[in-house]
Image (cartoon, rainbow, N blue to C red):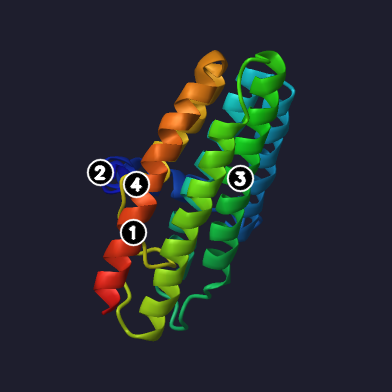
Amino acid sequence: MLDRVARRALDPAVTRAAAAVDRPWLSPDRLTVAGLVIGLGSAVAAGLTWWWVALVLWLASRVCDGLDGPLARRRARGRPEPASQAGGFLDITADFTVYGATVVGVAVGVTSAYPDTSWLPFLLVLLAYYVNGAAFLAFSSVAERTGRRIDDGRSLSFLGGLAEGTETVVVHSLWLVLPQHAGVLALVWAAVVGVSAAHRVVAGYRALR
């Protein structure tokens, strides 16, 4: 829901940051892998209840994720050959891996630090992520094949929804800032992502009819 607004607000700063990190040794794919490794480190830190370390690593991971695309587009500018889609594939795979890992890491940390907290809300978040991801990835694949691609500069055709990347960054950060309330936050977040997934299924079906 907030991705479009956030992208417009942050685009000048992100463009400048992409120019600042544009060095021959730092490719967009290396930035993606760095974000993946740092994100997995955040999950491990959360599992160990190192909340503030996990928060810093989580935000650093998302910064890398926010810069790899702009850096790739900057490098592709002016090139006669079409840009490779391998980076986009790597990026979305890394995102899903980090999202899932951080949910598990927070669940492990929270349930060990606060034994009264149940695993169930976090399992519901993973289920909602699964359905949500399946819906928009399936839509992107079919839309590409049928010539109904949504081109917003990203590699995949993204259907908007109630829960997008910006909201995910905020909620995962709140888990780490307020781990004692993470179970309740996860339950609410699972409901929000579930509604977003249902909306994507309906919107995607209608768009492809």
Q: Residue 2's quadrant in the figure?
A: top left
The span from disc 2 to disc 3 (Cα, nearest Å) is: 25 Å
Q: Mark number for residue 183?
A: none
Is the N terminus in the top left, top right, bottom left or bottom right quadrant?
top left
Label located before the other in sequence (2 or 4): 2
Q: Residue at x 40, y 84 (%)?
A: 145
Asked if the residue at tag 4 contacts the one at tag 2, i.e. Cβ–Cβ closer than 8 Å, the answer is no
Three-letter code for the amino acid on which mark 2 is drawn: Val
- Which residue appears at 38% of the width and 49% of the height? 15
Give the total of numbered labels. 4
State how far apart marks 1 and 3 are (Cα): 20 Å
Of residues 4 and 191, the one nearer the viewer is 191
Residue to which mark 2 is pinned: 5
In whole angstroms, how far apart are the C-alphas of marks 2 and 1?
19 Å
**Where in the figure is residue 121, as x and y percent of width and height?**
54, 32
Q: Image check: 25 left or right of 10? A: right
Q: Earlier in the sequence, mark 4 or mark 1?
A: 4
Q: Position of residue 41 (x, y in %)?
A: 71, 35
Q: Are marks 3 and 4 in contact (CB under 8 Å)?
A: no
Which quarter of the image is occupied by the C terminus? bottom left
Point 65% across, 42% down: residue: 101
Which badge, 1 or 3, comes first in the chain's sequence?
Answer: 3
Q: CA distance from mark 3 to mark 4?
A: 19 Å
Image marks 2 and 3: residues in contact by CB distance under 8 Å: no
Q: Is disc 1 placed on a helix, strand or loop?
A: helix
Amino acid found under the numbered disc labelled 4: Val
Q: Which residue is mark 3?
A: 100
Tell me the crowding category of disc 2: few under 14, some 14 to 19, or many 20 or more residues within 10 angstroms, Cα based: few
Q: Secondary structure at mark 2?
A: helix
The disc labelled 3 sits on which kind of residue? Gly
